[in-house]
Amino acid sequence: GDSVTQMEGPVTLSEEAFLTINCTYTATGYPSLFWYVQYPGEGLQLLLKATKADDKGSNKGFEATYRKETTSFHLEKGSVQVSDSAVYFCALISSSNTGKLIFGQGTTLQVKP
Amino acid sequence: DAGVIQSPRHEVTEMGQEVTLRCKPISGHDYLFWYRQTMMRGLELLIYFNNNVPIDDSGMPEDRFSAKMPNASFSTLKIQPSEPRDSAVYFCASTGPPLNTEAFFGQGTRLTVV
């Protein structure tokens, strides 16, 4: 079945460091891909998305490019801030139109001043 | 719209008791998801509905868990009887149409079974 695999955390960075969180997926067809973020004590919220191959999603300085050839959707940010500390989830919706929204296990990011 | 509304926010119950979690999705959304989040297992999809019909309940851990969606504006997740290992944060989310749009999550219900 469809699945999402993320790099294990926690990831600890200093402020202004470069961030990469790896995400790979297994799916039939052409899923839509998402990154969600969860701040402490809150539900998940959409960070960015890409719906077809080679699309780049971007928001708040974060970017991710849909790479069909490597089945990847890695999250990047050039300069992280303390306020970026959160749990990041990669997710997909199957293109077979079943509507199943599947998440990776989440990666905790801690940014230190 | 006030977003996805879950109740209660916190629930503490004794082992063996029945627990009912509630969710009101965003008006107009036709998909509703129930997830469970724990440190050990991360975010697990329990069940999801489309147009009030359960589509996939393969993530429901045991027969003790059941979910209903009697209408487009309300869903429940019931655990009977509850056990300590059910302790987790339970999230409800809604989305669509179209299918690849953003899913909106509620604030979650933190369940503690003692």
Image (cartoon, rainbow, N blue to C red):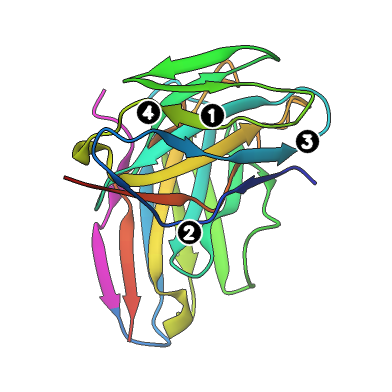
Q: Which mark is residue A27?
A: 3
Q: On the same chain: label 3 and label 2?
A: no
Q: What amino acid is found at the position of numbered circle 3 in the picture?
A: Ala
**Which quadrant is home to the N terminus of chain B?**
top left
Q: What amino acid is found at the position of numbered circle 1 in the picture?
A: Phe
What residue sits right under mark 1 in the picture?
A34
Q: Residue at (26%, 32%) from the top-left corner?
A: A16
Question: Viewer-nearest of labels 2 and 1?
Answer: 1
Task: Answer left or right for A91 relative to B88.
Answer: right
Q: Which mark is residue B46?
A: none
- Find residue A112 and report its horizontal and vertical position in percent: 21, 48
Q: What amino acid is found at the position of numbered circle 2 in the picture?
A: Arg
- Find residue A57 and report its horizontal and vertical position in percent: 50, 16
Helix, strand or loop under label 3: loop
Q: On the same chain: label 2 and label 1?
A: no
Q: Determine the CA span between mark 4 and mark 2.
A: 20 Å
Segment tinted magenta in the rendering: B1-12
Given the image, what chain letter belongs to the residue carrying mark 1? A
Mark 3 crowdedness (10 Å alpha carbons): few <14, some 14-19, many ≥20: some
- Residue A90 placement: quadrant: top right
What residue sits right under mark 4 in the picture?
B26
Q: What amino acid is found at the position of numbered circle 4 in the picture?
A: Ile
Q: Determine the CA span between mark 4 and mark 3.
A: 28 Å
- Residue A84 placement: quadrant: top left
Question: Viewer-nearest of labels 3 and 2?
Answer: 3
Given the image, what chain letter belongs to the residue carrying mark 3? A
Q: Which mark is residue B36?
A: 2
Q: Are marks 3 and 1 in contact (CB under 8 Å)?
A: no
